Image (spheres, helix red, strand yellow):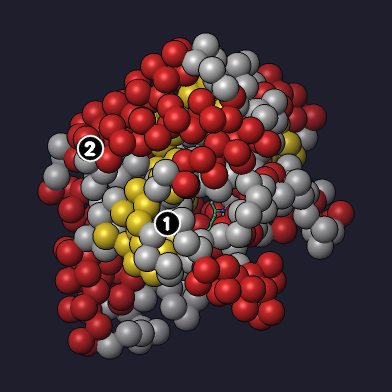
Amino acid sequence: MNNTKSKSLFAEAKKYIPGGVNSPVRAFRSVGGDPIFIESGKGARITDADGNEYIDFIGSWGPHLFGHNPPFIKHAVKKAMKHGTSFGAPTELEVKTAKLITELVPSIEMVRMVNSGTEATMSAVRAARGFTGKDKFIKFEGCYHGHADYFLIKAGSGALTLGIPTSPGVTAANAADTLLADYNNLDSVKKLVHANKDNVAAIIIEPVVGNMGVIIPDQEFLTGLRELCYEEKIIFIFDEVMTGFRVAAGGAQELFKIKPDLTTFGKIIGGGLPVGAFGGKREIMETIAPSGPVYQAGTLSGNPLAMAAGYAALNYIKENPGLYKNLERTSARLEKGIRKNLKKLGRKYVINRVGSMMSLFFTEAEVTDYKSALKSDTQLFGKYFHEMLKRGVYLPPAQYEALFISAAHTKKDIDYTIEANFEALEAVIGK
Ligand code: HOZ
């Protein structure tokens, strides 16, 4: 595989951009080697700067539920662009998009659009603090909620991958109000709540974790958290930046039948353009300025191009209810194929999957939380990643990220990937 142009672009990028990338995991640090630079994407495939084609299982880290560059989103953005790119004033499209979100996700009574998942989560926690008048919040070890200071404590995603789960630059004062619990362990949460009686504003959780690889929640754990939040007057926040509109039209909350107080979105909600959102109960959302005193703002919030792409994506979801069944079929086929391969090779590596989000962990012990995720052999994952890349399959370049399957992946793509997976596993672990 010729990577000459990617290599020279990376060398040039490192002169002007920290680490040569605008988001750390892209740099391939944890799998070794140099990143490939992408030139275009269509459907399930991407083409790099040297003309190599790959079946893509990143999908821009989640937004591309329908594959790359679907014509209906392209058309919507082109149409919006004719009228202008930004006004910093309200537009009809924002109202339509907000209404559509409330239709698709019943717990959302009101919603505020922002520009990224990070903005959404930090604004949701601010709203919870403003509404309750309490300071502390609970997050789970290994969950990632964007890069606001007080979230970067035992955080997942790139922070975990690069071995900096707690980032320098986060002051002790900033970290002091973040309480850490263990995922899938209700007792660990109860202990914190009782030790901080009447001072926990919110519990924020990835209802299906995507940021330490995929981790599946126990139903009783989520139900227990919901009850605890009611009892203790704590705002329950579902971070559905990854799972929103992906695992079901109504997100993980539809799948697990939980009604959070607030929800954060990103990725799919922007149809591939930079968008985030947070929303939920009217009485909490009414505390946001200018309705209430909790300040939150943004020049490009509700940007017309992003709204056009997001509205097109959400509308497609509404009009095509069969979409998730098909995604499940495709994703289950991939899971089954990889399980078969592992069996043939005599390995019991863990596969965690919820809908079109999946992870293969290089450990034979169950992966249910941060500590068990850390048992995965990340060196082996790195080798496997490169064997797959060689075979034209582009996986997330980190063990602690989710693989995303799109509606554009065909049976042929999946069967090819299963074959590549067998060869790649065989190459790294032997027969
Ligand atoms: N932290 C993102 C995924 N969990 C990666 C974002 C990116 O590199 O684009």
Quadrant of the rendered image containing residue 361: top right
In the image, what residue occupies the spot 40% across and 48% down? 392
Type of residue at label 1? Ser
Task: Tell whether 221 sits left or right of 336.
Answer: right
Q: Is residue 182 visible?
A: no
Given residues 161 and 146, the one toward you in this image is 161
Tell me the quarter of the picture where residue 92 sits.
Answer: bottom left
Q: CA distance from mark 2 to mark 1?
A: 21 Å
Total of numbered circles in the picture? 2
**Residue that numbered label 1 is attached to:** 60
Other-residue count near label 2 (Cα within 10 Å), few / some / many at <14 / 14–19 / ≥20: few
Disc 1 residue lies near ligand 1 with CB under 8 A: yes
Q: Is 372 in front, or is 230?
A: 372
Considering every residue shown, the one lying at the far left of the view is 319
Residue that mark 2 sits on = 412
Find numbered disc 2 in the image and state the secondary structure of the residue it sits on: helix
Helix, strand or loop at label 1? It is loop
Residue at (53% x, 21% y) in the render: 350
Q: Can I make out residue 336 in this image?
A: yes
Q: Quadrant of residue 174?
A: bottom right
Name the kind of residue labelled 2 in the image.
Lys
Residue drawn at x 63%, y 33% is 380
Q: Is residue 200 above or below residue 370?
A: below
